[in-house]
Image (spheres, rainbow, N blue to C red):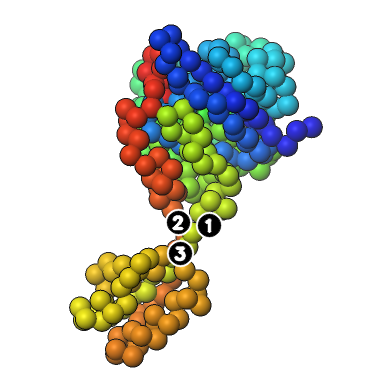
Amino acid sequence: MSDWAVDLRGLRKVYSGRVEALRGVDLQVPRGSVFGLLGPNGAGKSTLVKILMTLIRKTSGEGLLLGEQVGHKATLARVGYLPEHARFPDYLTGEQVVKMMAGLAGVPAKATRERTGTLLERVGLSQWKTKRLRSYSKGMKQRIGLAQALVNDPDLIFLDEPTDGVDPAGRREIRLLLQELSREGKTIFVNSHLLSELESFCDSVAILSKGEVKMSGSLKDLTGRKVSYRLTCQSVEPATKALVEGEGRRWQENELIVEEASATAVMPIVDKLRERGVILEGMRKEAISLEDLFLEAVGHDGPGGAVAGKGGQS
């Protein structure tokens, strides 16, 4: 069995007019992980997921889901999906939505009855299950969307902006649920623009821009490849600041940031500050943030920097 839940090689999507939404994407997602796909609007994120879900066709390239070719029907039955801006009939109750989606997914009636209540409880909506969706907030509708994505007990779950419209407490609950699902052996594939949120629970990430993967790997490896040290001082004279400034060293008020350094390399700087009578209140090591990685990978690619494709694909 392959170690990859998703394994893509040279995936391309060209729309009419030679509009390239995906330009030879190579991407591997480890089984049982929480994976985050990042990118500016129009980068091709939603296009990629829709190809994997067979909602649109690829132009060329190879793709495997759970070890089988993309489009393999038995494998798709093991996949859950929450699209961006998911819409369900607002005259249905939360319970009815989950049951309806279970029916469409071919879930047996007994399993549907057993799972519906459990899923609504897991997403925090058990007390609202008999209320019609028209009375739900946007965040509550997102939770229902998450519940229906789990109704077939999938091994692989695609979630496109799953916390859109959810309040901070609800986002935390969803993060904890996704981590719990990962511990159960499920693979979670999340599209999101909330970098700090993905940083808090993803195992690995890929950054997509202009239809190309600019950077990918485990979050630990990516953020650990660059470190800096932040020295906090009580007060520093301008002349002393100038003395220790230089390439890779900059002041933020009374904090000196030494970039891409080791603890050994920082010690001579500390000695210089002490010689000048500067009192150090603290020193801490900082890894590069996901936001820094994103900006490094994407550069000046703005929302219009990548092709959206048909229907405003992102």
Specify the amino acid type for callout 3. Glu
Q: Is residue 139 above or below residue 259?
A: above
Q: Which residue is drawn at the image coordinates 45% and 21% (left, top)?
A: 21
Q: Is there any visible trace of residue 134 in the rendered image?
A: yes
Q: How many marks?
A: 3
Mark 3 against mark 2, which lies toward the viewer? 3
Dot 3 falls on a residue whose secondary structure is loop
Depth order, front residue of 286/246: 246
State if disc 2 and disc 3 touch (CB < 8 Å): no
Q: Which residue is drawn at the image coordinates 55% and 28% (left, top)?
A: 25
> Where residue 112 sits in the image (x, y, percent)?
64, 19
Inter-mark Cα distance, 2 to 1: 8 Å
Residue placed under numbered mark 1 in the picture: 225
Residue placed under numbered mark 3 in the picture: 260
Tell me which numbered mark, 3 or 1, is placed earlier along the sequence.
Answer: 1
Specify the amino acid type for callout 1. Arg
Inter-mark Cα distance, 3 to 1: 9 Å
Mark 2 against mark 1, which lies toward the viewer? 1
Residue 1: which quarter of the image? top right
The image's mark for residue 288 is: 2
Image-based side of 59 in relation to 265, left or right = right
Specify the amino acid type for callout 2. Ile
Dot 2 falls on a residue whose secondary structure is loop
> Where residue 91 sits in the image (x, y, percent)?
41, 11
Q: Is residue 185 above or below residue 245?
A: above
> Where residue 289 sits in the image (x, y, percent)?
44, 53
Depth order, front residue of 143/63: 63
Depth order, front residue of 64/153: 64
Tell me which numbered mark, 2 or 1, is placed earlier along the sequence.
Answer: 1
State if disc 1 and disc 2 touch (CB < 8 Å): yes
Where is the C terminus found, in terms of image quarters?
top left
